[in-house]
Image (cartoon, helix red, strand yellow):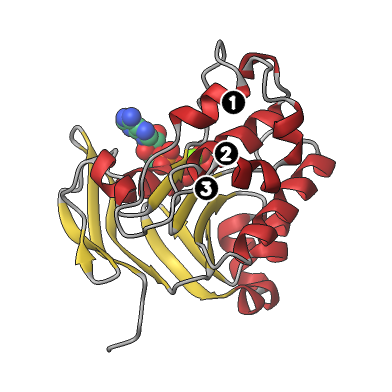
C-alpha cells in the first residue's frame, strides 16, 4: 500500500464535452524512472498527458505528485511544481530564434533552489548552441523536437511528460532523441513518454503501461512487455 510513488494517478475520468475519453484511468511511477505510455491511435495517450499537465479538465479522480494533490491546479502552477510537458506538435515559436524560444521556457521550479541556465541546456544540446540565432521555423523536425524538449527543461522539471517525441522523425534522429533521453535519465528526472514506437520505448523505458479505449489494460516492467507477445499483438499490433 505505502509504496513510494512519485506520481500516482487514481481513477481519472476525463471528457471532451459530452464524450468520455478516459475511464477510471490509474497509473503510477517512481522517482527517476521512465514509464512508456503505449497505445494505438486515439487510445487516449495525449489526453492522459494533457490531464496531468492541467490542460484538460479532470471530472473525477486524483493526481498525486510526491503525495500532493494537483488535479485541480492550473497548468502554470503544475509546471512550477515540477511537471514539464512537451506537446505532440512541438509548438516552437517559429518566428523567434532558438535562444529566444529557450528563454521563453525559463521558469523557476518552486521546489528547488537552483535554476537551470542556458549554458546547462546547451551542454545537453550542443546542436542548439550552434543554431541559437536561427529562427525556430527554419529548423528540421528533429531539431524542433530537441528545441521543444530543451525549452521544457528550462523550466527545471522533476517530471517530463513527452508526447510522441519520435513521431515523424527519421530513424537516425530517433536514435539521437533516445540518446538524449538516456542522458536525462542520468540526472534522475522522472519521465512519462507517450509513444506508438515500441522499439524506441524498449530501448529507454523501465516500465510500460498500455492504454486502450481510455483505460489502462497492462502495467508492468518493459522487460515483461517485451516477452508478452500476446499483449503486444492484441493492443499494439506488433
Ligand atoms: N479536443 C478534442 N475534442 C474532442 N475529442 C477529442 C479531442 N482531442 C482528442 N479527442 C478524442 O479523444 C480520443 C483520444 O485522443 P488522444 O489524442 O488522447 O489519443 P492518442 O492516444 O494520443 O492518439 P494518437 O496516437 O493519434 O496521438 C480520440 O477519440 C480523439 O478523437
Ligand atoms: Mg496523441
Q: Mark 3 vs ligand 2: CB under 8 Å?
A: no
Element under disc 1: helix
Pick whichever, 154 or 173, lies toward us.
154
Confirm or deny contact between disc 2 and disc 1 (CB under 8 A). Answer: yes
What residue is disc 3 on? 162
What residue is disc 1 on? 99
Q: Report how far apart the C-alphas of labels 1 and 3 lie in the structure.
A: 21 Å
Pick whichever, 88 or 214, lies toward us.
88
What residue is disc 2 on? 118
Confirm or deny contact between disc 1 and disc 3 (CB under 8 A). Answer: no
Return the disc, 3 or 2, that comes first in the chain's sequence.
2
How far from the left and from the top, in percent, is residue 138? 69, 14
Label drawn at residue 107: none
- Closer to the observer: label 3 or label 2? 2
Return the disc, 2 or 1, that comes first in the chain's sequence.
1
Which corner quadrant holds the C terminus?
bottom right
Could you tell whether 204 is left or right of 58 in the image? Answer: right
Q: Is residue 43 visible?
A: no
Return the disc, 1 or 3, that comes first in the chain's sequence.
1
Amino acid at each position: 500500500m505505502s509504496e513510494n510513488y512519485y506520481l500516482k494517478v487514481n481513477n481519472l475520468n476525463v471528457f471532451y464535452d459530452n464524450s468520455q475519453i478516459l475511464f477510471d484511468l490509474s497509473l503510477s511511477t517512481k522517482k527517476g524512472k521512465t514509464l512508456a505510455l503505449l497505445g494505438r491511435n486515439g487510445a487516449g495517450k495525449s489526453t492522459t498527458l494533457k490531464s496531468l499537465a492541467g490542460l484538460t479538465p479532470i471530472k473525477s479522480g486524483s493526481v498525486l505528485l510526491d503525495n500532493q494533490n494537483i488535479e485541480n491546479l492550473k497548468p502554470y502552477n503544475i509546471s512550477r511544481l515540477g511537471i514539464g510537458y512537451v506537446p505532440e506538435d512541438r509548438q516552437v515559436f517559429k518566428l523567434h530564434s532558438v535562444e529566444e524560444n529557450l528563454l521563453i521556457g525559463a521558469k523557476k521550479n518552486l521546489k528547488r533552489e537552483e535554476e537551470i541556465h542556458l549554458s546547462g541546456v546547451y551542454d545537453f544540446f550542443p546542436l542548439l548552441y550552434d543554431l541559437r540565432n536561427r529562427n525556430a521555423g527554419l529548423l528540421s523536425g528533429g531539431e524542433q523536437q530537441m528545441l521543444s524538449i530543451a525549452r521544457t527543461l528550462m523550466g527545471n522539471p522533476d517530471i517530463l511528460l513527452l508526447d510522441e517525441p519520435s513521431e515523424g522523425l527519421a530513424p537516425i534522429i530517433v536514435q539521437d532523441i533516445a540518446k538524449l533521453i538516456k542522458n536525462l535519465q542520468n540526472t534522475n528526472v522522472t519521465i512519462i513518454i507517450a509513444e506508438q514506437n515500441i522499439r524506441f520505448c524498449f530501448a529507454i523505458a523501465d516500465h510500460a503501461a498500455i492504454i486502450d479505449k481510455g483505460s489502462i489494460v497492462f502495467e508492468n516492467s518493459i522487460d515483461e512487455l517485451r516477452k508478452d507477445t500476446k499483449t503486444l499483438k492484441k493492443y499494439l499490433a506488433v
